Image (spheres, helix red, strand yellow):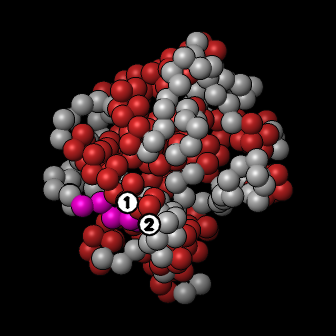
Amino acid sequence: MSSILAAFLFFTLEALALHISTPVKTCPTEPDWGIWIDGRDVAQGGDVYGLEFNVQATTSMKNVYAKVAENKKPDLDLYKFIAKLYGELFMENSAPHVSRNVALCMKAETPEERAKIMGDNIAWTQQLRANDAFGNRGGQHRGIFEEYNRRQDVAATYDAKLKAIGFLMRNLAFGHGLQDHNGRTRGAIMQHELRRLGLGCGTFMFNNNKDMAFNTPEYAVGKIQEGIDAYSDWQKTKVNPWSHQEHVDAHKQNFPMPPKVVACWNKNYKNKKLSKPTSIE
């Protein structure tokens, strides 16, 4: 192991263990493309998803930053507002959604391991079905935000606040309420909450997509902290840390995904028309 990788691993693990943070008061007003370009794709450049996508994402994030100034707890209205920025209409009265591809690959795991991944998920039942107690998709997502805000109301530490955000990200990933741009909408809500709560200025995540539905609660929090650290590094150096292979290697070593789940995904969905080519690693 190189000295650079060893140092990065030590720093990352220490950060995940301690989560020491000073409340953030001042953040950049201009969003950087590292917020919406996955770290796994950074080597291909900031325009890897297309110039049009970058323009839309930049405009959307500026609107999200403006919302932070209102200092309002996130709710279904914020979710619909951000979804609309990305051109998505939330079908509130539709039945709660279950991603068939996620459910199929969850079944590749043992019941014990699957229970660890499901964790504190309320969007689905442990039987990998939508939680019918919410009635419809609007009720499902309203319930997710209500429980998230309840958790934040009693969160007294940085760790507890970040854990609540992890809960929100995982449940929105399971809810998957939009036709497209679910990851981008979810990620924008995360930026909103990190700034609103003074936990950080943003995240540069390695993956903004369906990997969140396969993260344990602990993995979700760890990856968010990793994203916060990557954003902070960029603030200091103006270099996206995911452009360094050592950071990519450290991520994969710190957060290996379940082999059976990865094998299922790669076999059935990674390069199929049933789902846009993506990675859950």
Identify the residue at image location x=44%, y=72%. Answer: 46
Task: Give the residue number, with chain letter if any, for mark 1.
Answer: 55
Instruction: Report the residue marked by disc 2.
Output: 51
Q: Which residues are magenta?
A: 30-35
Kind of residue indicated by mark 2: Leu
Q: Position of residue 272 (x, y in %)?
A: 78, 55
Check whether the beta carbons of the residues at disc 1 and disc 2 lie within 8 A of each other.
Answer: yes
Q: Which of the image's four quarters has the N terminus? A: bottom right
Residue 59: x %, y % from top left: 32, 53
Residue 247 in view: no
- Please state if 123 lies on the left or on the right of 69 as rendered: right
244, 100: nearer the viewer: 100
The answer to whether any part of residue 1 appears in the image is yes
Pick whichever, 121 or 37, lies toward us: 37
Q: Residue 32 lies in what quarter of the image?
A: bottom left
243 vs 256, left or right, is left
Q: Note whether 183 is above or below 34 in the view shown.
A: above
**Residue with the most extreme bottom position:** 2
State the image quarter where residue 203 is shown. Answer: bottom left
Residue at point 46%, 71% (across, down): 47
- Asked which secondary structure carries label 2, the reply is helix
Viewer-proximal residue among 150 and 171: 171
The amino acid on which the numbered mark 1 sits, given as a three-letter code, is: Val
